[in-house]
Image (tube, helix red, strand yellow):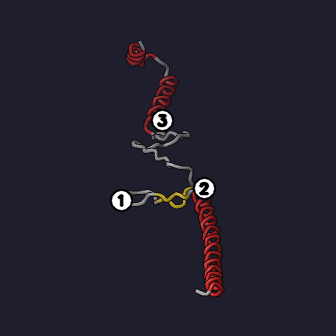
């Protein structure tokens, strides 16, 4: 439909007044100039870029991230992250304190037994002397 209209105007252009022809010529030149000027080819938008392949890793226990390998390629067997488990460290310190306390108690018990052993030796020696053996 539009094509037929444009064809009719083109055929009848000689019958239009010269001021109209200049106006159409100017409009055509402006349209051609607008088509010749490059338009922006960028789209500005907010978004999130995601990797094509994503691997989720979860810690087997509650932990804090201590160190993390920098982004990029890594060799096989490379440590990617080091986790710190404060609960485990607290439990280890508690068990170490219990162990030190038990060692101290065992030392005291050992000293008691050695003192008892010496006392028994002296007592048996005294009894032997009294009995005359």
Relative height, residue 79 to residue 124 (above, below) = above
Say which residue label 3 marks. 34
Q: Mark 3: few, some, or many residues within 10 Å (few <14, many ≥20)?
A: few
Query: Left or right of 7: which side holds 111?
Result: right
Relative height, residue 17 to residue 33 (above, below) = above
Indicate the quadrant containing the C terminus: top left, top right, bottom left or bottom right: bottom right
Estimate the x, y position of residue 18 in percent, counting from the top left: 49, 24
Query: Left or right of 31: which side holds 85?
Result: right
Viewer-side residue, 39 vs 96:
96
Q: Residue at x 55, y 59 (%)?
A: 84
Mark 1: secondary structure: loop
Please report contact status of discs 1 and 3: CB closer than 8 Å, yes or no: no
Estimate the x, y position of residue 117 in percent, counting from the top left: 61, 78
Question: In 3D space, how far apart are the residues under numbered discs 3 and 2 (Cα atoms)?
Answer: 69 Å
Relative height, residue 103 to residue 45 (above, below) = below
Nearer to us of marks 2 and 1 is: 2
Say which residue label 1 marks. 77
Estimate the x, y position of residue 4 in percent, counting from the top left: 39, 13
Disc assigned to residue 87: 2
Quarter of the image holding residue 65?
bottom right
Q: Earlier in the sequence, mark 1 or mark 3?
A: 3
Viewer-side residue, 27 vs 67:
67
**Residue reaching furthest to the left:** 76
Q: Mark 2: few, some, or many residues within 10 Å (few <14, many ≥20)?
A: few
Viewer-side residue, 54 vs 124:
124
Query: Left or right of 36: which side holds 92?
Result: right
Estimate the x, y position of residue 62 in percent, counting from the top left: 56, 50
Quarter of the image holding residue 77?
bottom left
Q: Residue at x 56, y 40 (%)?
A: 46
């Amino acid at each position: 439909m539009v094509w037929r209209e444009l064809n009719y105007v083109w055929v009848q252009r000689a019958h239009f007044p010269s001021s109209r022809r200049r106006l159409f010529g100017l409009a055509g030149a402006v349209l051609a100039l607008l088509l010749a000027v490059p338009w922006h080819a960028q789209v500005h938008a907010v978004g999130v870029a995601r990797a094509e392949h994503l691997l989720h890793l979860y810690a087997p226990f509650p932990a804090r991230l201590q160190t993390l390998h920098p982004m990029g390629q890594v060799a096989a067997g490379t440590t990617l992250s080091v986790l710190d488990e404060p609960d485990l460290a607290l439990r280890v310190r508690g068990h170490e304190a219990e162990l030190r306390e038990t060692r101290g108690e065992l030392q005291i018990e050992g000293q008691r037994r050695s003192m008892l052993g010496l006392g028994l030796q002296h007592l048996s020696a005294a009894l032997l002397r009294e009995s005359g053996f």
